[in-house]
Image: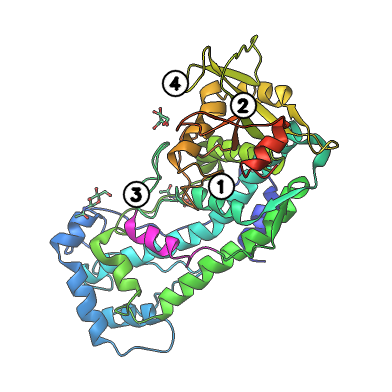
Amino acid sequence: MNTHTVLLAAYGLWAIAAFPFAFPSPQGVGTGADSCPSEPLNNDTWIELDLDNYLMEAAHNITPTETNNVQALAQYFGAPNFFCGLDSFCNAGQPCLPVTTSAWYILVAIQNWNQYMNSLHTAVMFATSIMSLIIPQVVNDLNPPRKNRDTPMKNMVGLISLVLGFIPWSGEMAKFGEQISNARFSASHASGRMKPTVQPDKFMIWGDVAASLGELAQDYQRAVATELKRLLDSPIDAKDGLGGLLGGGGFLGIAQNFTQADLQERVTDVITRRSIALVLQEQKAFIWRYPNGCKDYGKADVMCVDDGDSIGGKAGYRLMKPDRFKPNNANSMEEAAGLLLGKYGMTKDELFMGPVRCFINNGRQQLADPFGDNLPTNKSVDCLFNLQICDKVRGLGERNVHVRGRKSIIENCRDQGLDV
Ligand SMILES: *[C@@H]1O[C@H](CO)[C@@H](O)[C@H](O)[C@H]1NC(C)=O
Ligand SMILES: *[C@@H]1O[C@H](CO)[C@@H](O)[C@H](O)[C@H]1NC(C)=O
Ligand SMILES: *[C@@H]1O[C@H](CO)[C@@H](O)[C@H](O)[C@H]1NC(C)=O
């Protein structure tokens, strides 16, 4: 356990843990040696000075070492004491002291990248601690009798990745509604290099979220640390080396601090919405559609819609789940629906029609997940909150074909392939 983990553990689940590093931040404009005024720290400067070329030429000139080729590069530039790594905050110093301005910009970018990787490493803990604040409350509200049922752990990876998507690598943190879309970051993230591989037999225990997530957090941190080490050790000009990551100057900027509270503000709504869906999915909740005669009498668990496919009158959509004791019965979820619309601020459209649109727009696939681990930052986007859909008449969104025979709702839904 490193010192930061200890520090975070000491803060427990409280949202006050500030980012606990003291960075030697690049000083920006005007504070370099007088004879070496520096340009603004941004990608325009990088491109103007053609630093991609400068970096690659330097990389070709150094003899690759077994480990830490980044340090070898710094040494070549004349800065032998430049050691990056986990908890090692390499410092570019001031321009011209000791290295030339062009080399200095490159070292600043490396310093920022190194800080970014350290930030990710810490933010994994922030993410799981934010999740540990949100999820137990959702479970307590929606799933009281069955606290110890579980969900595949891989569903939690996307929530951590969502939080990490807001970490600044230079300049400001992403604002609400936008996620940092650094193509290079996304590429290495998407390729799985900075994500743990979660075995399908790993589950999260809803009744013990903090402990369940602890192990995942460690795996996630290990993946980040391994990638950091790999990039420090690889030759700068190797395929998938640091040179490519720095290319374009995206990492040239001013270092930025952030706190767990900064992140929490940005991700709480999405994590809450997603958790609600996972808890309801675990209960095998579904939306039952019947084609006519809908009356909601003001009830939370029913929505009446003139949906174009209804047969005289409005079609009804009802939130239901299988009865725990009578396997062929389904119960309406009036109380849960009331919480979703009240306490959790969902609209009826989000609760009922969102999952229906997700189903129809994804080839009538149950629980379609178009996001993978790249969750949207907007809680209202279709499919983030998702439930199985069961239609009394087959062909929702296509045409109405009556199901024959006298079957219960659950039997009818099973015939349609629902897992209920
Ligand atoms: C970041 O935090 C460190 C340590 O708390 C502090 O010394 C530094 O001034 C902060 N930098 C910015 C840009 O806020
Ligand atoms: C420089 O960064 C800005 C802000 O991130 C971005 O909009 C712009 O496209 C970048 N320019 C180049 C040439 O990459
Ligand atoms: C979020 O998504 C909803 C539904 O697609 C849309 O109406 C709303 O404008 C979006 N909000 C933001 C902040 O993008």
Can you say which quadrant of the picture contains the C terminus?
top right
Q: Which residue is mark 3?
A: 171
Residue that extends furthest to the right in the rendered view of this protein: 325
Q: Is residue 145 above or below residue 375?
A: above
Q: Amino acid at mark 2?
A: Tyr
Tag 1's secondary structure? loop
Q: Earlier in the sequence, mark 3 or mark 4?
A: 3
| Number of the label disc, if any, that sits on residue 90 | none
Classify the position of ligand 3 by quadrant: top left, top right, bottom left or bottom right.
top left
Of circles 1 and 2, which is in front? 2
Q: Residue furthest top?
A: 297
Q: Residues in magenta? A: 182-195
Front residue (pair 302, 309): 309
Quarter occupied by the N terminus: bottom right
Q: Secondary structure at mark 4?
A: loop
Closer mark to the observer between disc 3 and disc 4: 4
Which residue is farthest front?
Answer: 405
Neighbourhood count class around disc 4 (C-alpha, 10 Å): few under 14, some 14–19, many 20 upward? few
In this image, 279 relative to 105: left or right? right
Distance from disc 1 to disc 3, alpha carbons, whole Å, reads: 18 Å
Q: CA–CA distance between discs 3 and 4?
A: 49 Å
Q: Check disc 1: other Cα within 10 Å, few if <14, some if 14-19, many if 20+.
A: some
For mark 4, what is the residue?
Answer: 308
CB under 8 Å between discs 1 and 4: no
Residue located beneath label 1 in the image:
18
Structural distance between the alpha carbons of marks 3 and 2: 33 Å
Q: Residue at x 50, y 38 (%)?
A: 359
N-terminal of the two: label 3 or label 2? Answer: 3
